[in-house]
Every structure is written in structure tokens, then in C-alpha cells.
Image (tube, rainbow, N blue to C red):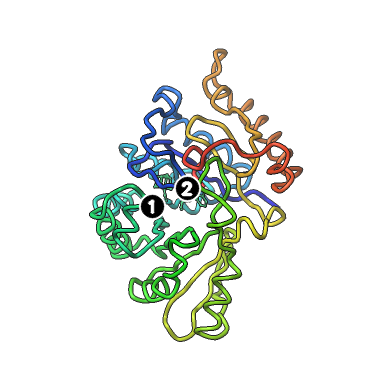
Amino acid sequence: MAISYLRVSVTDRCNFRCRYCMPEGKKEFIPHPEILRYEEIAEVVRVFSQFGVTSVRLTGGEPLVRKGLESLVYQLKEIDGIKEVSLTTNGFFLEEKAEALKEAGLNRVNVSLDTLNPEKFSYITRGGEEAFYRVLRGIEKARNVGLVPVKVNTVLIKGFNDSEIEDFVRFSANFGVEVRFIELMPVGGQFFSRENFIPISTVRELLEEKFGELQPVKTVKMGPAKSFRVGDTGAVVGFIPSVSQHFCSECNRVRLTSDGKLRLCLMSDREIDLKSVLRSPEGYSEEMLKKVIAGALLLKKNVNGIEALESLGCSRKMFTIGG
Ligand code: SAM
Ligand code: SF4
């Protein structure tokens, strides 16, 4: 499959500490000088655009904790061939940032929200109940300034939010957002267990039982989610079965970590160091970066996520990769 989509983590820092993503009290992060500067990220994206990448998603850590993200958005949108720049955020800073991001050329946002209950929100993010209301205001603001379609990412956790599936359907209809249910992944942490894992099939069955057969929504397909209308509720939901159904053959993406490593597969620790090319003591050479990226993309054809998970494994935590 051709690689058209690049996920860029702009920082490993975050104002939350979601239990499935980051250890409590985490204070050690990648030192600032090791983090790619915006100009370096833009250069990597420019070279990737020559290999067919048309869509970039900014992620983290929390991308909006990094200052002046809108200037990166602007630089990326100036690159020939980059048609779409989007953002995955926890939504905490979205209310104040949405307008500037839209003006800089950001196309759309995905906001992570695992529960509609402020108390549970505070538990899972360790971010306090007030943060829940800020996230809701951020979602509304994003929609109002036209960062659409706004999608909400909801990680399914048994005993935590499986009782809220119908609430999320109502939320989708009322807020005019698509809710995408994501399977909890066993990535770099202790939170995942068989006991708290819910397969997507369970949610689908529940929705079909309650609302009848789900109606597929026609979309330009950029990723593994599939979108459906839920009866006549006005809600649109998506499913990301990242654990129960691997989608290596449909994978069109690679990832750039905030410290300049190219990851060919979320589930594989195989990384290619692009920062050392960007900061080569002999001076930066575009030709060299092109060669390294071309080699990496060839390798990508041969990476199988399931094999990687079993043999190499994924030792990085999610906040260092960006999901
Ligand atoms: N901070 C931003 C946010 O939360 O949206 C962007 C980075 S976060 C690492 C990207 C996505 O990864 C979020 O939607 C988050 O819910 C998801 N994520 C983190 N850890 C996960 C895990 N163990 N399983 C499934 N999804 C996970
Ligand atoms: Fe931060 Fe996002 Fe990880 Fe939560 S999921 S700790 S918001 S990076």
C-alpha cells in the first residue's frame, strides 16, 4: 500500500496523565534540544511529500502544550503536495487555540474523550473535573470555527466506559461529532489486561441490537476507521479494531517521533534515525534524507505488525509515539 499519511509527534510532554498512556507523576521527558525544531519537521514532511505523502497529522504527547503550533501548521500547509494537516489533541487548550489553528490552515481535529462523566474523566486523565468542561468547550469551539468534521476518540475500557456507549451515541448527535471507538492497546504500559479489553465487535453488536443495522457513511478513506450512521439518531460512529483485527495490508502510514525517529509500524520498535541526517556534522543533505526515507519505505513493505508485536514488541509508551 502506498504511504500517503504521516503522523508527527511534536512533543512527548502532556498536561494529562491518562492511565493507559502515561505513568503517574512522570517528569522525565526528552530534553528540549533533542526535540525536532519546527523547521526540521517541515523539512522531513517536504521530503515525504515527494514520496506521495499528502496528509499529516500532528500528535504527541499533547501537541497543544508546544508553543506556536500554528506556525508549524502554516509551514506544512505551504508545502507542495500536502493537502491536509490535522491534529489529535486532548482538547484542553482547544478553546483558546482553535481560531489561530484554523487561520494557519489546519483542516480538522480529533479530540480524545473516554467518558462523559466528569468524575470518571478526572480519574482516567488524572486531570481534574474542570478539565472535562474545558474539553467540551474546546470541541464546540473547534466545530464552530470550522475544524470539521470534529471526531472524538474514545478508548474502550471494560468496567469504565462500556456502560456509556448509548450516551456517546446521543453525544455524537447533539454535538455534531463522529465518535470513534478504539480498542485499548497493550502499548508500553501496565494498564492493559484481558479483563479491561473490549473488542469492537461487542460495541457493534450492542448498537445493532438497540438501533438496527448500522448504515455505512461514504468517506474518502484515510485510515482504519469505518464510519456508520446509527439508526435515525443522527449519530455517526467509527470503529478502530486495532487489536482484534490488524490492518497491516491496509496500512498507509508511518510515524515521526518528537526526537526525529521514523517508526514504520506502531507495533514495532524498528526505528530509523532521521535527526542524525538533519543534524549531520558534515552538513544537511536533502539527497541523503531522500535516500534514507526511500530505504525506510522499502522496509515498510516487509514489516508485519503482528510479527513485530511478537518478536520485537513495542517498548515505547504511547505518548512518545503519538498513537
Ligand atoms: N494527547 C493527544 C490525545 O490524547 O489525543 C494526542 C496523543 S495520544 C497518545 C493519541 C491517541 O492515542 C489518543 O486518542 C489516546 O486515547 C490514544 N491512546 C493512548 N494510549 C492508548 C492505548 N494504550 N490504547 C489505545 N489508544 C491509546
Ligand atoms: Fe496525554 Fe494524550 Fe497520553 Fe492522555 S492519551 S496522557 S492526553 S498524550
Frontmost residue, 315 versus 258: 315
Residue under label 2: 20
- Quadrant in which residue 113 is drawn: bottom left
Say which residue appears at 49% left-offset and 42% top-offset.
8
Q: Would you say the residues marked 1 and 2 are in contact, meaning their CB atoms lie under 8 Å apart?
A: yes
Say which residue appears at 66% left-offset and 53% top-offset.
251
Placement of 276 over or under 260, stated as above or below: above
Q: Earlier in the sequence, mark 1 or mark 2?
A: 2
Real-space Cα separation, disc 1 to disc 2, in angstroms: 8 Å
Say which residue appears at 41% left-offset and 56% top-offset.
112
Determine whether the residue tagged by mark 1 lies in a helix, strand or loop.
helix
Q: Which mark is residue 124?
A: 1
- In the displayed structure, does residue 72 sit left or right of residue 191? left
For mark 2, does the 10 Å Cα neighbourhood hold few (<14), some (14 to 19), or many (20 or more) residues?
many
> Looking at numbered disc 2 in the image, what kind of residue is underneath it?
Tyr
Determine whether the residue tagged by mark 2 lies in a helix, strand or loop.
loop
- In the displayed structure, does residue 266 sit left or right of residue 30? right
Q: Position of residue 302 (x, y in %)?
A: 76, 43
